[in-house]
Image (spheres, grey):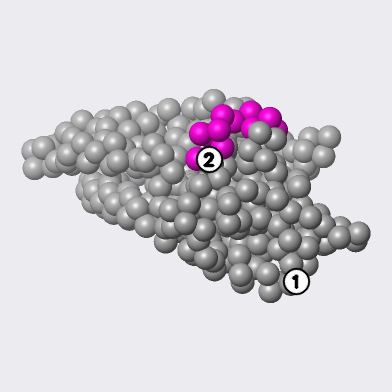
Amino acid sequence: MKQSGWRKPTPGLGVAAQFAQAGEQISASKSKAFVAVKRVGAHIGLKAGDMMLLDTLGAFTQAQDWEEGRRPIVWASNAYLMDQTGFSLSALKRHSRRLAEAGVIAFKDSPNGKRWGRRDADGVIIEAYGFDLAPLSARVEEFEQLYMELRAERELCQRLKRQITVSRRMIRAQIDAALSGGYSGPWTQLTNLFEELLSKLPRRPTASDALQQLLAWFRALQARVERTIFEETEVIEAVDNFTIIKSETPEKTHKMNPTEVIFEPDILITNKLKPVISNRLDKEKMADAVINTMGDYKTEMVKEDWAAKTHKLRATSLDLPTVMQACPEFASWAQDMGGYLKDWSDVHRVAGQLRPMIGISEHAWHVAQDQLGKQVATAALVLVFEKHCMGEVVSPGGYLRGMVEKAGAGELHLERSFYGRLNGQAS
């Protein structure tokens, strides 16, 4: 567009003029054009005052101004626009200049710099000078495509943030469990690395590239923590196996009652293994003693009686879609962890990964699976996870053990719990 000479030309104004010429050849409704630009306004550098002025200018246009071969030009005076927007003259000029530099409007100047225009009897603009909104028509498709890209980026960032949260909480739970359990290992160093990663968590909106890098760091640390725990667990299991072999001597065999399952603690006396296990073996036996207080189900019934009592529960048909619908919080976390969950095997795997996050010990999880079966135990953990996230359960581990006790007494009805949550959601 030829400049009149009184307005200093810039590359941005030149590009806006080109968009205006292109927009004249495109038919786009005013509503479509304004929705498109508002969706991406902040991304292309427009501020709230710019959008207010753009809305004010758009109100002067008519439907026929946006048809192909025409331009929506507004010739309202500065005084009128100042009255409508509440801007000062300098603010009005600043906002209109920013709109033009962003390629959203163009200036169609008259030789003397005055804005004016006239319409025919049908309301069609015959001649006009002022603010040209034709660039919006030319950029509708561009803005719509940009909006789709921004939305995809935003969804990706949200997903990455959830995955970072999952990894972060699992690392925290695993380190706390290792420290409280007396595990040996470089836990001070791992804790310092964890705190350093926490300090890198973004406080403002961050691009997906940075979040992906941060997630990779958290997952690498998580793998290192899990590897350290696994190595320590192998040592403990080796010591426990040695203890069991030593305890199964002929002298003790005659004391066992064949109709009962009796657990008698044995004291392992060896100078070689003592530095490795420290007081860990004692803590493990204390933990076993605590777990065995869950109704003393291991000492009060034989395994055959337990199987008979839980047979009905094991055979219960739990519909996976119903379980996921009744527990939306778990479903959200699970999808972030493992993507699409196609069967109970997938849910079992993800449940095992989320278990440490709510403080359920590996021992309690194994007991639940042994006594309830994989599918029912998985459903039970899903329910405990959901209740804990909703603030309904304070001690997830204790709640799960209580469910195992109820199952032994034939009083656990998971399907009722899930359908009850669905009814609560519906109401």
In the picture, the quarter occupied by the N terminus is bottom right
**Residue 248 in magenta?**
no
Q: Callout 2, which amino acid?
A: Lys
Q: Are marks 2 and 1 in contact (CB under 8 Å)?
A: no
First in residue order: circle 2 vs circle 1: 1
- Numbered disc in front, either 2 or 1: 2
Q: Which residue is mark 1?
A: 68
Q: Residue at x 73, y 61 (%)?
A: 127
Q: Residue at x 53, y 34 (%)?
A: 91
**Residue 93 in magenta?**
yes
Q: Nearer the viewer, residue 101 or 45?
A: 101
Residue 90 appears in view: yes
**Residue 219 percent across, percent down from the top left:** 33, 53
Q: Measured along the vertical axis of the image, is residue 27 above or below residue 373?
A: below
**Residue 276 percent across, percent down from the top left:** 14, 41
What's the magenta region?
82-94
Residue 314 appears in view: no
**Residue 244 percent across, percent down from the top left:** 29, 46
**Residue 413 percent across, percent down from the top left:** 73, 40
Q: Which residue is mark 2?
A: 93
Q: Is residue 407 left or right of residue 338?
A: right
